[in-house]
Amino acid sequence: MPPSPPHPAPAPQDASGPEHARGGLLGRWAVRLVEMAGRPALTVLDGIEDVGRAVRIGGMGLANIAIPPVRLRLTIRQMEFIGVQSLPIIVLTSAFTGAVFTLQSHRAFALFGAEGMVGGTVGVALTRELGPTLTGLLVAGRAGSAMAAEIGSMRVSEQIDALEAMAVDPINYLVKPRMVAAMLVLPMLTALFDMVGVLGSWFVGTQVMGLSEPEFWVRLGEWVDWDDVWSGLFKAWIFGIIIGSVACYKGYYTAGGAKGVGIATTTAVVVSSVAILVSNFFIAWALP
Amino acid sequence: MTAPPDAAGAGCRDPVTGEPSGIVFDDVHKAFGRHHILRGLDLRVPRGKLTVLIGRSGTGKSVTIKHVMGLLRPDTGRIWVGDDELSRMDDRRLQKVRLRFGMVFQHAALFDSMDVFENVAFPLREHTRMAEGAIRDKVRGLLAQVGLHDAEDKYPSELSGGMRKRVGLARALVRDPEFLLYDEPTTGLDPILAAAMDKLIHDTQQAHPQLTSLVISHDMAAVLKIADKISMLYEGRIAHEGTADFFRNHDDPLVKQFLTGSLDGPMKV
Ligand SMILES: Nc1ncnc2c1ncn2[C@@H]1O[C@H](COP(=O)(O)OP(=O)(O)OP(=O)(O)O)[C@@H](O)[C@H]1O
Ligand SMILES: [Mg+2]
């Protein structure tokens, strides 16, 4: 986004009294209003260009799956980085998410004596929404930012030029393994999120709130379909593609030294998080 | 592919050295936004010789060298590498041309996720099916040649600037390229390391008589010692070209000023 124009200089004070001053103030407010209204419009346009470029980079990375070499080792290393190293944060977050959701829904359902619905409600919410979305946001913050920073610093230190100079396609070498890894790992992490989340819910439901085992499990088994699970995992797969594309794109187009790498890192997290939340709505709408 | 015209293409001989041209720029223009960097650049790099491109900071020397490898594309004008014309080449053919090059980057551009050995071995692993033992021999030989036999396991962040550049040279040489490009190999090194690097460049050229080298440098004393041909870039074109002797004895105020590093002259700070 272009830097916003400097604020209009305050009108030179003259002797004509308060009316004039108020006119100047109104004018300034009008300018501010237009500026503020214009800013989202610019941001949207900016965002569309972003989307186009991210889709291009991500798409090229995925298309490169068909182009040798396979880059198995690099892919496994990325899966380790995105997946294995995210395990603690995923386990912790999912356990507490399941726990707090159970606590609150138990309170609400208790108002009309329907505590038995807690297990099923939590199960559906976790598998369909909370699992994939929170996993996506966590991975975007942890791994997406690191990916953008790594590729960005390779850009500004001319390592990407060096790859090209050595006749190695940077898309094939850098983007493909990250796209594939993110795409594969996100559903796995989501499945884990779902399972640990249910365990957290079970603990609070049965051990803290005093539900019996059947009360908790029966509705959960009745309400949660494989469809719910699949739709959650499908979303996670899409979120993996979003995180990979946005991080690689932001890193790839980094300019301006260390500061540029910082900007690429933060914008990668912001853009992919927003993209996850927005696309989540549309996928939920389109899926049964 | 169109045949190169007599005046410019790869067929012609270089007037300074009498050798056939390995790399030719014909009326190349390049602008970044409003900055017109190359303004009708005509450059000839003779085969089997060491050519040095001199010029002030920011005149577009790095931009020129990036055009040679197709990392940047000219706005107008043509560039030949041997008999291949780059400007209209698609990416796959360009990759083939790049395989004939080695490049030493201004700031080395080593991969910081790999140790020194893996950095130097990288082009072999990517483009050949050499056995691990052969790769090891080749890489160790080159590291010894650049005086870094004991740095194999270090990571780029653990190396000094001079060591990085030498690793960069080893990496550029590892596939026995036809063309070798150096972007300011001695800038930022202390005088002794710089002299060692100049000697390394000179020895490399002597050891590979077929090698066509293009060096970017500011260091006039060294340039006059090692260059077979010197081209001077000024305001987006070659202002002067000739042998070291030609430059030493030249009266042109531009050349004089650059050689002596004087503040008075046509170039203003
Ligand atoms: N990718 C780019 N985008 C925009 N401007 C660029 C780009 N690359 C180079 N320039 C500009 O082109 C000019 C020449 O840059 P170049 O790096 O070729 O200089 P140089 O002759 O190598 O200088 P030095 O001796 O300091 O390395 C500079 O003004 C630089 O800002
Ligand atoms: Mg330069």
Image (cartoon, coloured by chain):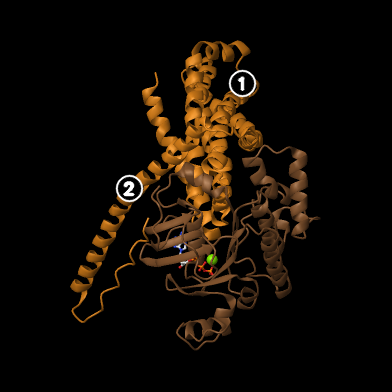
Chain colours: A orange, B brown
The image shows residue A286, relative to residue A92, as above or below, that is: above
Q: Is residue A130 visible?
A: no
- At 50% from the left and 28% from the top, the residue drawn is A237
Q: Secondary structure at mark 1?
A: helix
- At 33% from the left and 46% from the top, the residue drawn is A44
Task: Give coordinates of residue A231: x percent, y percent.
Answer: 47, 21
- Residue beneath disc 2: A45
The answer to which quarter of the image holds residue B227 is bottom right
Closest to the observer: A115 or B251? Answer: B251
The image shows residue A151, relative to residue B205, as above or below, that is: above
The image shows residue B251, relative to residue B64, as above or below, that is: below
**Few, some or many C-alpha atoms within 10 Å of disc 2 (few <14, some 14-19, many ≥20)?**
few
Q: Chain of mark 1?
A: A
Q: Secondary structure at mark 2?
A: helix
Q: Mark 2 or mark 1, which is nearer the start of the sequence?
A: 2
Task: Give coordinates of residue A215: x percent, y percent.
Answer: 57, 12
**Few, some or many C-alpha atoms within 10 Å of disc 1 (few <14, some 14-19, many ≥20)?**
many
- Residue beneath disc 1: A202
Q: Disc 1, ligand 1: is the CB inside 8 Å?
A: no
Q: Nearer the viewer, mark 1 or mark 2?
A: 2
The image shows residue B52, relative to residue A59, as above or below, that is: below
Under mark 1, the amino acid is Trp
The answer to which quarter of the image holds residue B260 is bottom right
Under mark 2, the amino acid is Leu
Q: Is residue B4 visible?
A: yes
Q: Chain of mark 2?
A: A
